[in-house]
Amino acid sequence: MAPDSTSQSVSTPPTRRLPLWEFVGLTAMLMALNALAIDIMLPALPQMGADFAVREENDRQLIIVAYMLGFGVSQLFYGPLTDRFGRRSVLFVSLFFYVVAAIMCVYAPTFDLLIAARAFMGASAGGSRVIAVSAARDLYAGRQMAKVMSLVMIVFMSAPIVAPFFGQLMLKVMTWHGIFWALAVFGVVMFLWVLLRLPETLPKERRVPLNLPTMFRNYVKVIKTREALGYTIASGFLFGGLMSYISASEQLYHEVYDTGDWFALWFAGAAIAMSVSNLINSRLVERLGMRLISHAALIAFVIISVVHAVIASQGPVPFPLFYTLVILAFFCIGFQGPNYNAIAMEPLGALAGSGAALIGFASSFVSASIGGLVARQFDGTVTPIFIGHAVVGSLALVTIFITERGKLMKPHHHADH
């Protein structure tokens, strides 16, 4: 990425700007395309497994994991493409294929082809995520961008809270195919909204030639940046824990704890806990610093997960205790994402685009691989999931300990880059 591709942020604003409320709504909905495509499916997994006669129950989790793998890998390519061809044209292609992929899922004749269509759907959705963040960076700089992204996150976090409710309501009146039709319609609505309302935010004079050697060089530079590499790996581990819980959640709440139609409500609790910690973080981070908050919360997450794993290995965990520990763990996870992102991006300057793509890749592809692996160990008890959380949390902590050269919770003054 050329050095001026990020530093020039607001020097050539587009001719027509959306009002702030509409830009926040549009950006949040583009990012919600992804959250909806994951969480709205959860109540439908048993029905889909039965329709395709899936013998191994844990294989149903692939409907979630395949999507996340496609979503993760694609972000590495969307970053350079959108810097070269502009935001709108790449976003149109991304949304078009999202709709096509949703319809492919409806007509998939076999389980293997459904999984392939889900991976393709994830790869399509990667564009909406990358471009939502890039467009915000084109239009807003510094604290203003932080404010816009905080507003976007508040709207966006409502998606995982309400999506399983929608999924469950739809299943009362239609089969799982209807859920994919609904996602296709949502994709069409977003396509039209962008077409009619979103101006191009990257003027021609600020576009960067698409150059594969440069792209690889930029990724290598990001990987050689200590904080960027360390925090990207740590976020891959930590969000692997989150993905294992999401992938196995339907089994945890239906098979271990027979919650029936209450599944969507219990599932929403973890998303609400993360929203609350996101909100608290936005209030405290300027005063206390990113490292103090995220390191303390990570240590707390490891302790909670170890306690949960130990209790679970002794026998069945009563639901109130299980749920309290889950909520506490997710409250701690909410403090990691925004802070890891900010710490990793801090030293990157003009490489921000490549950095954002690489972090997006790690927190999706790497976490989906780890999460899928942990969730597949599900054996009818909560034990494997929470042993997994204790392991990935500990690995994230060790990674950050090494990255920070043994100095946890201390602010940095960037003289070394």
Image (cartoon, grey):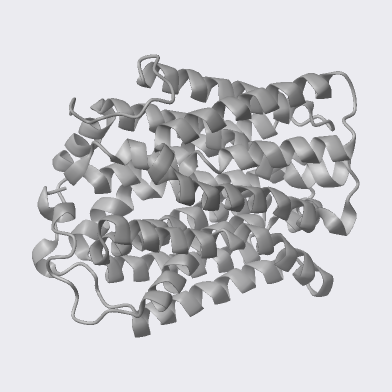
User: Could you tell whether 305 is left or right of 346 in the image?
Assistant: right
Residue 387's x, y, as percent? 70, 23
Instruction: In this rendered view, identify the residue nearer to me: 192 or 334.
Output: 334
Instruction: In this rendered view, identify the residue nearer to me: 352 or 176.
Output: 352
In the rendered view, tell whether residue 103 sits above or below residue 161: below
Residue 68's x, y, as percent? 53, 47
Residue 336's x, y, as percent? 50, 38
> In the image, what residue occupies the spot 82% across and 19% down?
313
In the figure, residue 382 lies in which quadrant?
A: top right
Residue at far front of view: 287
In the rendered view, tell whether residue 5 sits above or below residue 314: below
Instruction: In this rendered view, identify the residue nearer to me: 118 or 416.
Output: 416
Quadrant occupied by the C terminus: top left
> In the image, what residue occupies the spot 78% across and 57% down?
265
User: Could you tell whether 313 is left or right of 85 in the image?
Assistant: right
User: Could you tell whether 164 is left or right of 408 in the image?
Assistant: right
Decide if residue 244 is in sight here.
Answer: yes
In the rendered view, tell whether residue 294 sits above or below residue 26: above
> In the image, what residue occupies the spot 79% across and 41% down?
323
In the rendered view, tell whether residue 150 sits above or below residue 339: below
Residue 189's x, y, as percent? 50, 79
User: Could you tell whether 378 is left or right of 149 in the image?
Assistant: right
Q: How many marks?
A: 0
Residue at far bottom of view: 196
Decide if residue 361 is in sight here.
Answer: no
